[in-house]
Image (spheres, rainbow, N blue to C red):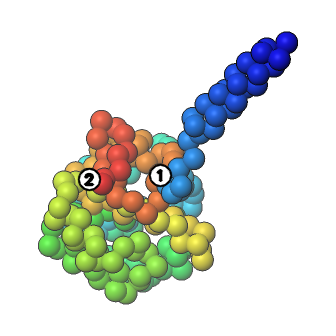
Amino acid sequence: MKRWKVLALLVFVFFFLGLVGCSNNNPNPIETISLEPPLYLMGGETKVDGFFEFWDEMQLIHGQMSMLGGEGFLEKIEEHFASLKKSNTILIIFPSKEGLQEYSGIAENYPCLCPLESSDLESKVNNYSTPLIYSCQDIQESVVRLVIVAKELYPSTAEAINGDIPLEVFLTCKDDQLLILE
């Protein structure tokens, strides 16, 4: 009888240890967030191919959203700043000297709209292929700031960012999936 108790106890201990060993407790889990209205799509003076197709897909996914961009981009930001500050934003940047200068101008004048320092973004653009995606949460305003650096946008990119988006890590989009860059 004692043997059965010891055997049962050993089976229980191994079973318990097996469950504990299978836990998926990552000490540094990556936080995620989802985009929700109110939502602004912003594109600078330097055009990104596929911008309007991306816009159309975003509207299909999220419904009504606002768009801001084109010539006089900084002046338009100033004009709509109160709304932008309280909205989730997606800033589209072309990976060129001019596009990065636009980002720098926005970061300098409206830092709350830019989740990254200009030098950090430029460094990543120089080291990785596009699209590069980065997001963070503005805790003070309870909004998401997303930056996409791309030569061309696709509707599938809109679908890929429709869901849980990892915060404060660089991402790319391949085969319609978000991938974390190392």
Local SS, label 2: loop
Q: Is residue 94 visible?
A: yes
* Residue 141 sits above or below residue 157 on the image: below
Q: Residue 165: which numbered mark, if any?
A: 1
The residue at the point 56 percent across, 67 percent down is 143
Extreme-front residue of the structure = 2
Image coordinates of residue 16 in percent, x first then y, are 69, 32
The C terminus lies in quadrant: bottom left
Left or right: where does residue 99 sit relative to residue 23?
Answer: left
Give the distance between the C-alpha atoms of the residues marked 2 and 1, in whole angstroms.
15 Å
The residue at the point 21 percent across, 70 percent down is 123
Q: Residue tagged by mark 2?
A: 131
Image coordinates of residue 158 in percent, x first then y, are 39, 46
136 and 13: which one is in front?
13
Three-letter code for the amino acid on which mark 2 is drawn = Pro
Left or right: where does residue 84 sit relative to residue 171?
Answer: right
